[in-house]
Image: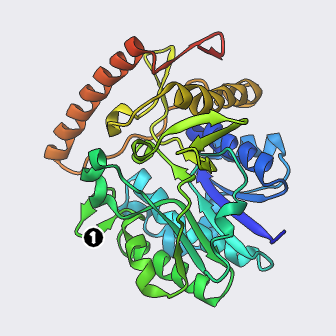
């Protein structure tokens, strides 16, 4: 098997999600190395205590010492914006430290594998860069301003063409990387739209089983057969992007489907979300002797002005209404004594 390496980043608030990604990757791509940039000391200390195989981790201080140009942007960025700025630079560090790797692929920390990623790589025999479209539903068309492609999976072959594209991306993120739309720019993600123009060897992944997510699941029929989650009865689900999963109202775990006007079928609840939620809770039980994760709260997105502040308040009110509706309709998971119902 080709030497394929993966990288991601998260802090202690996202640790259970990051470890769920790690464990799912080990199940479906045994032995694959996952490099983790620890965005907090608590995260670094916990991963050191766990001593997991095939997991290589670096502290933020070590990363910043290796790339001081990125570190210099920190005072000009919010916490989330700085994390976004780090994405291509972290890929560059891993490419440099894995000279024998065929591919280095960045993965968002809230991905979860259900099948081997091998089918994705079969699309890439001549590619040097792999990106994946959002595939927004018509109901989520308003989100197209955030870019054609999703930063959840970005792969680079360890060759001059692949390295050149990631190097360009790193430089653009150093120049500008903010949590709002500015023309065709948005955080680290908007730049992906320029990738196909940088190299003829940029491949857009076609397999709909890769990066199924709340913003595109409405395009498909999801069912469960022969121990696999199937998409339109033809493609197995490879990995799901669990964006928006969060705890709330003390006893519940919510999803973001209602925000994207996406369906949430029984198959989706029982065979996609249930395994993920169960894994998160199992990780919390295992890690809590080292670090209390039960009260972890991912960072809030920043508001840049008064208008954005009030828009954020309105979104939060709508989100609370959605959560109450999800409880009533059975979309939310009730967690009692560490078990989801």
Residue furthest to the left = 307
Residue at image x 35%, y 31%? 258
- In percent of width and height, residue 198 lies at 45, 86
Total numbered labels placed on residues in the image: 1
Task: State whether residue 251 is above or below residue 198.
Answer: above
Name the foreground residue: 161 vs 248: 161
Residue at image x 55%, y 85%? 201
Quadrant of the image occupied by residue 308: top left
Q: Is residue 202 left or right of residue 286?
A: left
- In percent of width and height, residue 193 lies at 38, 73
Task: State whether residue 266 is above or below residue 59.
Answer: above
> The N terminus appears in which quarter of the rendering?
bottom right
- In percent of width and height, residue 174 lies at 43, 73
Give the labeled residue for mark 1. Answer: 184
Residue furthest to the front = 233
Which secondary structure lies at badge 1?
Answer: loop
Residue at image x 36%, y 45%? 301
Name the foreground residue: 115 vs 53: 115
Near mark 1 (Cα within 10 A), the count class, few <14, some 14-19 or many ≥20, is: few
Q: Can residue 301 be seen here?
A: yes
Residue at image x 38%, y 11%? 328
Colouring scheme, one of rainbow, by chain, secondary structure, one colour: rainbow
Quadrant of the image occupied by residue 24: top right
Q: Is residue 143 left or right of residue 90?
A: left
- In percent of width and height, residue 273 lies at 57, 31
> The C terminus appears in which quarter of the rendering?
top right
Q: Can residue 66 be seen here?
A: no
Task: State whether residue 321 is above or below residue 89.
Answer: above
């Amino acid at each position: 098997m080709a030497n394929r390496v993966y990288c991601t980043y998260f802090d202690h608030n996202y640790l259970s999600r990051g470890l769920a990604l790690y464990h799912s990757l080990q199940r479906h791509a045994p032995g694959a190395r996952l490099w983790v940039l620890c965005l907090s000391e608590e995260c670094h200390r916990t991963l050191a205590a766990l001593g997991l195989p095939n997991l290589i981790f670096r502290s933020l201080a070590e990363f910043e010492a290796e790339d001081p140009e990125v570190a210099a942007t920190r005072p000009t960025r919010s916490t989330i914006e700085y994390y976004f700025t780090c994405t291509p630079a972290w890929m560059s560090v891993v490419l440099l430290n894995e000279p024998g790797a065929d591919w280095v692929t960045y993965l968002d920390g809230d991905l979860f594998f259900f099948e081997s990623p091998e089918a994705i790589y079969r699309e890439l025999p001549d590619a040097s860069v792999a990106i994946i479209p959002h595939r927004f539903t018509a109901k989520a068309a308003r989100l197209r301003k955030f870019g054609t492609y999703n930063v959840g999976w970005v792969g680079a072959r360890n060759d001059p063409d692949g390295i050149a594209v990631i190097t360009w991306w790193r430089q653009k993120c150093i120049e500008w990387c903010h949590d709002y739309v500015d023309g065709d720019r948005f955080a680290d993600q908007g730049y992906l739209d320029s990738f196909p123009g940088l190299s003829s060897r940029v491949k857009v992944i076609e397999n709909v089983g890769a990066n199924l997510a709340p913003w595109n699941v409405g395009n498909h029929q999801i069912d469960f057969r022969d121990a696999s989650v199937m998409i339109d009865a033809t493609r197995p689900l490879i990995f799901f992007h669990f964006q928006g999963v969060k705890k709330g109202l003390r006893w519940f775990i919510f999803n973001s489907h209602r925000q994207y006007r996406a369906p949430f079928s029984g198959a989706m609840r029982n065979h996609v979300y249930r395994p993920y939620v169960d894994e998160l809770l199992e990780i919390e039980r295992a890690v809590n002797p080292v670090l209390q994760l039960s009260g972890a709260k991912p960072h809030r997105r920043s508001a840049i002005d008064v208008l954005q502040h009030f828009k954020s308040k309105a979104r939060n009110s709508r989100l609370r209404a959605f959560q109450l509706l999800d409880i009533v309709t059975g979309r939310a998971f009730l967690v009692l004594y560490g078990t989801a119902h």
